[in-house]
């Protein structure tokens, strides 16, 4: 084809050189625009360059921006709660064989769960639900912990000795109810006219039913029951996205050390040293007065799976005092004040869904921020590991409440109560000591937090690669029920028995590959497929205990990668291992119910009491 050199092709004329140049120009433009958009939306790994950070501050002419109203921000802002308080009550304890009543302080923590993970929780133990088993067992009796709050409410100053003596035979307690009233009550119950609390009076055990239990309990099919619906937040696709930036605004409630505040907000000792040195000429004080504000901008770290502070600004009487910012070279230098805002009364934090940590890490992050000893935090996550998938992300607004004793002479504290609110569900566990000296934690109904089956029975818990429900088979392409949950993990990761039981099958089973099936009590069965190897000694009739290794992760049978296919059957029907209601492992004997109910009432009242001012500096 012909074309005039240097001219635009006319009509049907075509120059391949001109066409190639046009295409390359277009591709180059697209790449440049893509790069610009990437930087605009995802940001860089540091807040500013040294040159930008050191520019002379200019007065802001724009109006202040409120954190609590809708603006051009893409990330929502939520109020956060962070209370660490002291409450007091009268308790009775035994000292040298004598009963004494004295005032006892308790530490109460009420806080929203951390919505971002920082260096504060970088070195926590790796999540392993099976390893948590041994850390949630009942505590042995300890004489120095025989503390009872059964005189709760009897306010005393100092200590009061308690003496007991038999009542004289001529003293008769007042009658609480007449025989006539008792007879009328019994007649009303028999005739069915009593409706207030009749389930407790008649003494039957109500069966808790759920959507997934209906077919099992009635013996009928599950037609019409939403068996295969998985409820997930709209932002679940962000799980694979990288971390983003978020800003935290907090108020200093009492005069505090700058170092203490920064440590509890994700700054390392090295960062604090650099910041203190940088602030020396513009903000030499290392003490933050009550009412001071901090604005901390967090962003992703290049070297760890957590957020690091990009910028920190100090405000005194809501006037900007100083700002430090992280440079591209990893140094903190003086920087410009961020855009002005209207400071809210409560502390706030931007919610970036990419930054939301797992329940497990968020509990650790929150506990360390509030000086909860690691031993207590470890027990808290262990108690909830049976009932919850701690690898799931938290949601904004999730919270935790903790009640513990203050440190004793040996710096030991004891957990008394923990309440974990996730979404619309609150799980509470109360400490209780039985007559044999055993200490354990129970829910308000006297059930322990432990389940007799685990939901993710392999080391580390695995990663959910396929959930229970109907799906397109990854190998055959057919649409059929996926009867369990797939938990991806490296080859030869140990697989544990989900509960005490008896081996029913341990062999190669067609598409399941190397396969183990366990039979448990009350019609429960669990099955484990695609093992690389079945553990030695696994054979039909062999008894196993919860947490015992029964095999190792592999990809045998019809499989597309290393994972555990885990199934639970109840009375022969498949159920979702991650959401089916599982029986509790232990319940308080009936003789303790009244005493336990009193303990619950006392703890609940302690959680509502007015607090005393903290004798140590608060960080928020």
Image (cartoon, grey):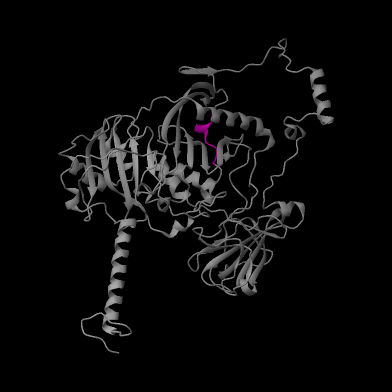
In this rendering, does residue 260 appear at all?
no
Q: Residue furthest top?
A: 170
In the picture, which quadrant includes the N terminus? bottom left
User: Where's residue 391, x and y in %?
Assistant: 49, 54
Q: Is residue 290 above or below residue 506?
A: above
Q: Is residue 542 above or below residue 336?
A: below
Image position of 245 (left or right of 429): left
User: Where's residue 178, x and y in %?
Assistant: 78, 17
In this rendering, does residue 292 appear at all?
yes
In the picture, which quadrant includes the C terminus? top left
Query: Looking at the rendering, which quadrant does residue 194 occupy?
Result: top right
Q: Is residue 583 above or below residue 594?
A: below
In the rendered image, residue 216 lying in the magenta stretch gets the answer no
Q: How many marks?
A: 0
Q: Residue at x 30, y 72 (%)?
A: 26
User: Where's residue 96, x and y in %?
Assistant: 51, 25
User: Where's residue 575, x and y in %?
Assistant: 65, 57
Image position of 497 (left or right of 321): right
Q: Residue at x 84, y 26 (%)?
A: 187
Q: Residue at x 69, y 36 (%)?
A: 590
Q: Is residue 420 above or below residue 240?
A: above
Relative depth, front residue between 132 and 391? 391
Relative depth, front residue between 563 and 114? 114
Magenta stretch bounds: 139-148
Image position of 169 (left or right of 406): right
Q: Residue furthest front?
A: 11
Relative depth, front residue between 573 and 596? 573
Query: Looking at the rendering, which quadrant does residue 602 occupy?
Result: top right
């Amino acid at each position: 084809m012909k074309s005039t050199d240097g001219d635009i092709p006319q009509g049907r004329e075509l120059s391949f050189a001109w066409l190639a140049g046009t295409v390359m120009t277009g591709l180059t433009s697209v790449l440049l625009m893509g790069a610009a958009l990437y930087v605009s939306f995802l940001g860089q790994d540091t807040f500013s360059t040294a040159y930008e950070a050191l520019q002379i501050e200019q007065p802001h002419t724009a109006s202040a921006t409120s954190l609590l109203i809708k603006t051009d921000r893409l990330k929502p802002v939520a109020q956060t709660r962070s209370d660490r308080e002291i409450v007091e009550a009268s308790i009775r304890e035994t000292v040298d064989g004598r009963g004494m009543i004295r005032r006892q302080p308790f530490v109460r923590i009420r806080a929203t769960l951390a919505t971002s993970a920082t260096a504060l929780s970088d070195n926590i133990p790796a999540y392993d639900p099976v390893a948590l088993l041994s850390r949630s067992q009942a505590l042995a009796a300890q004489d120095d912990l025989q503390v009872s709050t059964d005189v709760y409410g009897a306010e005393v100053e100092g200590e009061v000795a308690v003496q007991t003596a038999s009542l004289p035979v001529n003293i008769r307690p007042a009658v609480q109810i007449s025989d006539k009233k008792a007879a009328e009550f019994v007649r009303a119950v028999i005739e069915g006219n009593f409706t207030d609390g009749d389930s407790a009076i008649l003494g039957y055990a109500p069966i808790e039913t759920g959507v997934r239990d209906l077919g099992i309990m009635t013996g009928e099919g599950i037609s019409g029951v939403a068996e295969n619906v998985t409820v997930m937040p709209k932002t679940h696709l962000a799980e694979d996205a990288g971390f983003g930036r978020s800003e935290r605004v907090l108020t200093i409630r009492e005069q505090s050390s700058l170092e203490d505040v920064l440590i509890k907000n994700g700054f390392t000792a090295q960062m604090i040293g650099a910041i203190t040195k940088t602030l020396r000429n513009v903000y030499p004080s290392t003490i933050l007065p009550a009412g001071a504000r901090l604005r901390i901008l967090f962003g992703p770290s290049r070297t760890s799976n957590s957020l690091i502070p990009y910028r920190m600004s100090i405000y005194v009487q809501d006037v900007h005092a100083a700002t430090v910012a992280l440079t591209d070279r990893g140094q903190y230098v003086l920087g410009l004040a961020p855009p002005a805002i209207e400071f809210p009364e409560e502390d706030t934090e931007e919610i970036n869904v990419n930054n939301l940590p797992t329940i497990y890490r968020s509990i650790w992050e929150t506990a360390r921020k509030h000086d909860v000893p690691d031993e207590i935090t470890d027990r808290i996550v262990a108690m909830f590991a049976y009932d919850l998938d701690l690898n799931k992300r938290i949601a904004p607004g999730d919270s935790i409440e903790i009640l513990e004793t203050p440190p004793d002479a040996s710096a030991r504290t004891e957990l008394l109560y923990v309440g974990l609110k996730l979404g619309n569900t609150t799980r509470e566990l109360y400490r209780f000591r039985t007559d044999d000296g055993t200490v354990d934690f129970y829910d308000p109904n006297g059930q322990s937090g432990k389940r007799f089956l685990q939901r993710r029975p392999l080391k580390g818990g695995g990663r959910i690669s396929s959930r229970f429900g109907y799906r397109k088979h990854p190998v055959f392409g057919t649409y059929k029920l996926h009867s369990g949950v797939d938990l991806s993990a490296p080859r030869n990761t140990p697989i544990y028995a989900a509960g005490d039981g008896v081996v029913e099958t341990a062999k190669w089973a067609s598409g399941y590959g190397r396969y183990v099936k366990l039979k448990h009590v009350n019609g429960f069965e669990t099955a484990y497929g695609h093992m690389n190897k079945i553990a030695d000694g696994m054979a039909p009739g062999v008894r196993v205990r919860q947490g015992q290794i029964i095999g190792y992760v592999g990809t045998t049978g019809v499989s597309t990668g290393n994972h555990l296919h885990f199934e639970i059957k109840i009375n022969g029907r498949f159920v979702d291992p991650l959401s089916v209601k599982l029986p509790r492992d232990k319940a308080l004997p009936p003789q303790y119910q009244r005493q336990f109910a009193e303990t619950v009432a006392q703890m609940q009242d302690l959680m509502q009491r007015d607090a005393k001012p903290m004798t140590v500096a608060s960080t928020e």
